[in-house]
Amino acid sequence: MNALPANPPDEGRAALLEQLGSRSIVFVGLMGAGKTAIGRKVAAMLSLPFIDSDQEIENVSRMTVPELFERYGEPEFRALEQRVILRLLENGPQVLSTGGGAFMNAQTREAISSHGISVWLKADLDLLMERVSKKQNRPLLKNPDPRGVLERLMSERYPVYATADITVPTRDDRKEVIAGEVVCALCSFLGIAAIATSDEVDP
């Protein structure tokens, strides 16, 4: 199997960007799925700006996400998140990474559908546990049984994430590999010949 190049060939990238138009590529999925890390790589591959909605929320509020949760509670945080994402979606084309709960909001889903292409990074429980256990900044996991919380979130959220335009399984592999698979999936979704392999191009 041919390895994916670090950057798609220019004409392939141009075709993808032309089809994308002013839409954003929006990453959705649970915490720990790699939305920010993979999103950055995809943005670099396509020469698009990258924005993390959680980072933007922190910039706007001048508080961290855990502080916002603690001070205002989840419903208030979700309302702010929705406003920030709706505003960000007006600035495409770009790659936008969203918080794990953002896609659960029907209005946010509708806005993403109108102004973007949603990409679900689908991860299994063991991978998510391994990744989130390394960070202490997950408000929803401040619980004696974080694995149980993640299992519950998966059962609640995966059916909704499954409505995203594109699903890309993620695993413990190099970020470049997963990002390349996202770009291939985007090409397929947009009806463009895959820009991953090099010599097998029709004359």
Image (tube, rainbow, N blue to C red):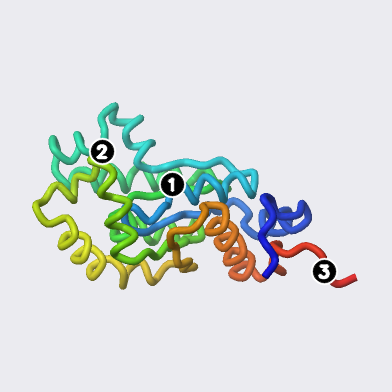
Looking at the image, which residue is at 82% across and 69% down? 201
Find disc 3 in the rendering and name its residue: 201
Find disc 1 in the rendering and name its residue: 36
Q: Amino acid at mark 2?
A: Val
Q: Which disc number belongs to residue 65?
A: 2
Q: Is residue 58 left or right of residue 178?
A: left
Q: Amino acid at mark 1?
A: Thr
Q: Nearer the viewer, residue 178 or 92?
A: 178
Q: Is residue 1 left or right of residue 23?
A: right
Q: Which of the image's four quarters has the N terminus?
A: bottom right
The image quadrant of residue 111 is bottom left
For marks 2 and 3 on the same chain, the one whose residue lies earlier in the sequence:
2
Q: What whole-number distance in Å separates the C-alpha atoms at marks 3 and 1? A: 32 Å
Q: Position of residue 4 (x, y in %)?
A: 66, 59
- Determine the secondary structure under disc 2: helix
Q: What whole-number distance in Å separates the C-alpha atoms at marks 2 and 3? A: 47 Å
Q: Position of residue 63 (x, y in %)?
A: 25, 29
Q: Amino acid at mark 3?
A: Val
Closer mark to the observer between disc 2 and disc 3? 3
The image quadrant of residue 11 is bottom right
The image quadrant of residue 194 is bottom right
Looking at the image, which residue is at 15% across and 62% down? 148
For marks 1 and 2 on the same chain, the one whose residue lies earlier in the sequence:
1
Q: Nearer the viewer, residue 84 or 49?
A: 49
Looking at the image, which residue is at 32% across and 33% down? 58
Closer mark to the observer between disc 1 and disc 2? 1
Q: Which of the image's four quarters has the C terminus?
A: bottom right
Q: Is residue 190 left or right of residue 171?
A: right
- Classify mark 3: residues with Cα within 10 Å, few (<14), some (14-19) or many (20+): few
